[in-house]
Image (spheres, helix red, strand yellow):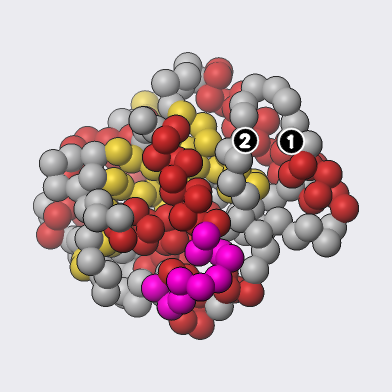
C-alpha cells in the first residue's frame, strides 16, 4: 500500500479537493483506494456523502478499541472507500501525547498497518498546521502532495515545511509540491507558475487551475470526474495522478 498525504501548513489551498479528486482518479484506474479524512471539519466525508462520525471517536482509534477496518465506509464509487472524519479529531494531538515529555510519532503508522494488504493506495486528507498529528502523518506517508497557491507567502510556508523535513531527518519522505488554485488572470500567478523558484525542491509539472467545477463540489457532493468527464479540471487531476504515480515509482 502506498500512502499519499495531501498536506500543507496553510488552509484553503485545495488539499481536500486534491484528496477527493485524486482518489477518484486512482480508483477509476482500477486501484483499491482508501481516503482517511483526518480533518475534524470533515469536508472529504461531506463530499462523499458520508456522515463524519467514527464509532468511539478519535480516542477509540488511537487506543485501538475498535478494529480499523470495521470503521471504514464504502462510497458510491467502485474501488473507493472512506475512513470518515470525526469532530473529536480536533483533540488527536492530546491523545497522541503520552505525557511526561514523551510523544508518539509512529502511532498512525501502526494503526494503518493492518490495511497494508487490503488497499493499493491510501490518501490522507490532513488538517493544516504543524502538529503531533502531522508528525505522525510524516512517518506514515510515502509522499506529501502539497497544493501551493502561487503567492509569495505560500512559497514561504513551503520553505518552512522543507526546513522542518530536513531538521527532522525525513529525507526518505517524498515531497511533491504543485501549484493549485492558479488564476492566470493574475500577473503574479503567471510569473510564479511560469518561472517556479529553483531551490530545495522541484514542483510537479501539473498545476490545478482556479475553476468553478472545484467550487461546485460542495453542491454536487461528488468528485468532479464523476459528474462530468468533459471539463478541464478532470484533465488536470488525471495529469496530476499520472505524474504522482511516476514520481512514486
Residue 136 in sight: no
Residue 69 in sight: yes
Q: Is residue 74 above or below residue 216?
A: above
Of all residues, the one furthest to the bottom in this rendering is: 219
Q: Is residue 31 left or right of residue 102?
A: left
What x and y, as percent, mark residue 164? 57, 26
The residue shown at (46%, 71%) is 229
Label annotation for residue 196:
1
Q: Is residue 199 above or below residue 183?
A: above
What x and y, as percent, mark residue 134? 45, 40
Q: For the stretch drawn in magenta, what is the main secondary structure? A: helix
Q: How many marks?
A: 2
Q: Is residue 53 left or right of residue 229?
A: left
Do tag 2 and tag 1 residues touch (Cβ < 8 Å)?
Answer: yes
Q: Is residue 165 above or below residue 23?
A: above
Crowding around mark 2 (Cα neighbors within 10 Å: few <14, some 14 to 19, many 20+) is: some
Crowding around mark 1 (Cα neighbors within 10 Å: few <14, some 14 to 19, many 20+) is: some
What x and y, as percent, mark residue 23? 37, 56
Residue holding disc 2: 203
Q: Which residues are magenta?
A: 226-235
Amino acid at each position: 500500500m502506498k500512502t499519499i498525504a495531501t498536506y500543507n501548513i496553510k488552509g484553503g489551498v485545495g488539499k481536500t479537493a486534491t484528496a477527493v479528486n485524486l482518489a477518484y482518479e486512482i480508483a477509476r484506474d482500477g486501484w483499491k483506494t482508501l481516503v482517511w479524512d483526518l480533518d475534524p471539519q470533515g469536508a472529504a466525508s461531506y463530499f462523499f456523502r458520508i456522515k463524519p462520525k467514527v464509532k468511539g471517536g478519535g480516542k477509540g482509534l488511537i487506543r485501538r478499541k475498535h478494529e480499523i477496518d470495521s470503521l471504514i465506509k464504502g462510497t458510491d464509487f467502485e474501488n473507493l472507500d472512506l475512513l470518515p472524519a470525526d469532530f473529536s479529531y480536533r483533540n488527536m494531538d492530546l491523545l497522541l501525547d503520552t505525557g511526561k515529555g514523551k510523544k508518539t510519532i509512529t502511532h498512525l503508522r501502526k494503526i494503518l498497518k493492518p490495511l497494508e494488504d487490503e488497499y493499493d493506495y491510501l490518501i490522507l486528507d490532513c488538517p493544516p498546521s504543524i502538529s503531533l498529528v502531522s508528525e505522525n502523518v510524516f512517518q506514515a506517508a510515502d509522499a506529501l502532495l502539497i497544493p501551493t497557491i502561487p503567492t509569495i507567502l505560500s512559497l514561504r510556508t513551503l520553505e518552512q515545511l522543507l526546513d522542518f523535513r530536513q531538521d527532522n531527518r525525513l529525507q526518505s519522505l517524498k515531497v511533491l509540491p504543485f501549484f493549485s488554485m492558479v488564476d492566470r488572470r493574475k500577473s503574479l500567478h503567471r510569473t510564479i507558475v511560469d518561472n517556479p523558484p529553483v531551490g530545495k525542491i522541484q514542483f510537479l509539472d501539473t498545476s490545478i487551475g482556479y475553476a468553478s467545477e472545484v467550487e461546485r463540489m460542495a453542491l454536487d457532493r461528488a468528485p468532479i470526474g464523476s459528474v462530468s468527464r468533459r471539463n478541464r479540471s478532470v484533465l488536470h487531476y488525471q495529469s496530476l495522478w499520472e505524474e504522482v504515480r511516476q514520481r512514486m515509482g
